[in-house]
Image (cartoon, rainbow, N blue to C red):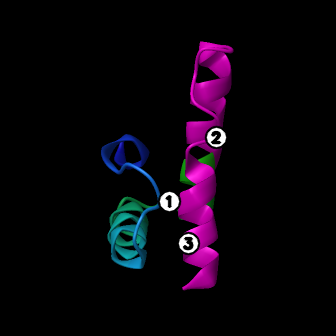
Amino acid sequence: MAHLSVRGEPTPRAVRRLRDRLHAAGTSLDEWGIVVRCDGEARGPAARPDASRSWRRVARES
């Protein structure tokens, strides 16, 4: 998944590419964020925190 391929903050360009791919697949960055968050929560305390948060923040700022 895209949120695992980038260390640190995603660039606006990376967010646009992901948003475009999701749109072409008939979904949105917000819906993708829900899946990423739920996946992390299902893994329990050893999982990374919500990795979609930085992607959604960069999308709002750009």
**Neighbours of disc 3 within 10 Å: few (<14), some (14-19), many (20+):** some
The mark closer to the camera, 1 or 3, is 3
For this rendering, which residue is in front, 34 or 41? Answer: 41
Q: Main secondary structure of the magenta part?
A: helix
Query: In the image, what residue type sits under mark 3?
Result: Val
Q: Residue at x 56, y 44 (%)?
A: 51
Where's residue 40, x and y in %?
60, 27
Q: Residue furthest front?
A: 8
38 above or below 52? above
Query: In the image, what residue type sits under mark 1?
Result: Thr
Q: Which mark is residue 50?
A: 2
Q: Residue furthest bottom?
A: 62
20 above or below 56? below
Q: Earlier in the sequence, mark 2 or mark 3?
A: 2
**Could you say whether the residue bearing mark 2 is in a helix, strand or loop?**
loop
Q: Earlier in the sequence, mark 1 or mark 3?
A: 1
Residues shaded magenta:
34-62
Residue located beneath label 1 in the image: 27
57 above or below 7? below
Residue located beneath label 3 in the image: 58
Where's residue 35, x and y in %?
58, 39
Query: In the image, what residue type sits under mark 2?
Result: Asp
Q: Residue at x 54, y 85 (%)?
A: 62
